[in-house]
Image (cartoon, helix red, strand yellow):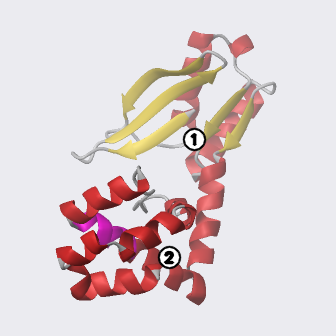
Amino acid sequence: MTDAWTDKKGRGVMNLVVHSSQGVIFLNSVDCSSVQKNGKYIFDLVDNCIEDIGADKVVQVVTDNASVNVAAASLMKAKRPSIFWNGCAAHCIDPMLEDIGKLGSVDRIIVQARQVTVFLYAHTRVLALMRKTLGKDLVRSGVTRFATAYLNLKSLQDNKKEMLKLFRSDELHEMGYLEKDKGKMAHKTVQ
């Protein structure tokens, strides 16, 4: 598996990881900042890893669906036809979920769920009471993966009874946060 990302210093980094019945093993991390990342470059990185591992032990390569990876997959298919190269399912599903999330009614619900979660995590005392009431944390929406918005919705739904108990508790009301605009909105949404 490959995973390309940019670190805090703006360097392009590619991680190469093996997943097997033994578990996940980190193979290598390559600073790609100063090279042209094209299909040949990606192919060479992956092919070198396959050589190190042994081609007879490799069944599949998984990458994101970037055009450079599609080009690398073509090169791999020509050299090693017995090895499958697939795009990451999450990279296929996430744009679909993002498009669904743009529908008016869905967008409104996602925004409300995010506002409730932000309210709960913005105040340490409220957060402590939430953790005491729920016995755990909620799944929070992330910035990079749209699927987390749906996981946040599911987390709120799965904890609906506890969330109602939390927002009806005297302890939360006595804190005074529910008198402020964001608290009123969160309270109304949960009710």
**Residue that protrudes farthest toward the right in the picture:** 82
- Magenta segment main secondary structure: helix
Q: Which residue is mark 2?
A: 110
Position of residue 53 relative to residue 109, above or below, is above
Mark closer to the observer (2, 1): 2
Q: Is residue 62 visible?
A: yes
> How many labels, in total?
2
| Quarter that holds the N terminus | top right
* Magenta highlight on residue 43: no
Q: Residue furthest front?
A: 170
- Residue 46 x %, y %: 57, 27
Question: For this rendering, which residue is in front, 190 or 85?
Answer: 190
Task: Report the span colored magenta.
Answer: 116-122
Coordinates of residue 189 in the picture (x, y in percent): 44, 83
Q: Disc 2 and disc 1: Cα gap in Å?
A: 37 Å
At 34% across and 72% down in the image, what residue appears?
169
Helix, strand or loop at mark 2:
helix
The residue drawn where x is 60% and y is 54% is 91
